[in-house]
Image (cartoon, helix red, strand yellow):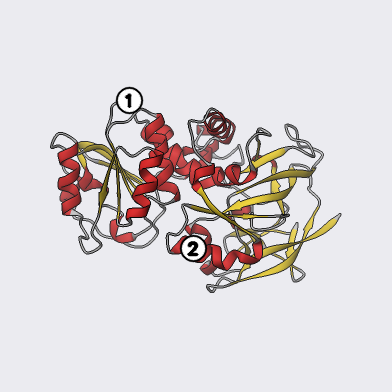
Amino acid sequence: MIASTLAAIADGDGAFTIEKIAVGSPSSDEVLVEVKAAGLCHTDHASLSWKRPLVMGHEGAGVVREVGPGVIGVTPGDRVVLNWCIPCGACFQCQRGDTVLCETSRPAHVLEPSRGHAHAEGTTWRGRPVDRSFNIGTLSGLALVRKEAVTPMPAAVPFPAAAISGCGVMTGFGSVVNVAQVQRGESVVVLGCGGVGLNILQGARLSGAAPIIAVDTNPAALERARTLGASDTIVARRDDVEMREVVEAIRALTGGRGADYAFEATSLAALAFVPLLFVRDGGLALQVSGINDPVTVPMPWFMWNKRYVTPLYGGCLPARDFPRIFRHYLAGELRLDELVTRTYRLDQLGQALEDMLTGANAKGVIVFGE
């Protein structure tokens, strides 16, 4: 069976169109998902310029429409959240348990490697195979994915809340609980209070951290931060590149020595290493926003015994982490609905991206079928 659906197609040169694509039936280890909601983050905007056409989107949730003959664990009609950590299960990293670092992660319906990418012939656009962003491409009415990309979700979790869990929530929450493993009473600083930063704050709150200090240039973002876990907020000046005033304020809140952990969630290359200035000697700085630009750092910022890591996807293990996130949500401990500032139709994607870039939203979500 070949089905057609509308999708957002990035052209690789900074623009996108909304066009029909054709999606095939799943083969042995694949699942066809009818996407109900897709979250947006800065990575989706960046994907516009990834030098090749692709189906956009990497946060999503929906309903299983069809499964391949080798699929167990999900059946048609199941509600699922999608993840872009799609392990092969056999490579060096997967065998070590670091499935988020899978060396051979591949899309559904692999056709052939080309320019370093495996094309999915199960999805075609204008008669030719087209890649799906992060092998899932959730800004599409249908997503053909490998079975490892879906995790069942409770019926009580709304699709928009589940969709943002697929990356932004997982990255922020997981960086705290899986990577840093913050303990009760330890101090945390979060630089940048957008979608990922707000979930770092939530992870810190659930871990019992104290104090939890939010830093941003936007007072409105700091207001949201207080509702989601920040005990203290600091307004940073845009012209204070090394944030020396912020450093002094953090030290005043942490007994004069700096925080145990500091997380960067701004996506600004100039701020990639600034968390090193926020932590105490022996503290841990984490760059969570996935900055890819070249940056330099004065080596004294690492003194003394400071550590710096760039965690990927919050150390996600989907079978462990999504049920945990949903349990916290259903217990009222992890706030997801409050993060969804606005929902949009697919034809409103341009406005949704603009609202994200201007900081108007904590999270924007594209909804399908409404």
Residue identified by numbered label 2: 355
Residue 123, percent from left and from top: 73, 59
Q: Is residue 333 above or below residue 123?
A: above
Residue 3, percent from left and from top: 82, 58
Amino acid under disc 1: Arg
Residue identified by numbered label 1: 184
**Residue 343 lies in what quarter of the image?**
bottom right
Q: Which residue is found at the position 77% from the left and 69% from the top?
A: 127
Q: Is residue 80 above or below residue 360?
A: above
Amino acid under disc 2: Asp
Query: Helix, strand or loop at disc 1?
Result: loop
Residue 19, percent from left and from top: 71, 69
Seen from the viewer's position, the closer of residues 163 and 339 is 339
Seen from the viewer's position, the closer of residues 242 and 155 is 155
Query: Helix, strand or loop at disc 2?
Result: helix
C-alpha distance separating marks 1 and 2: 36 Å
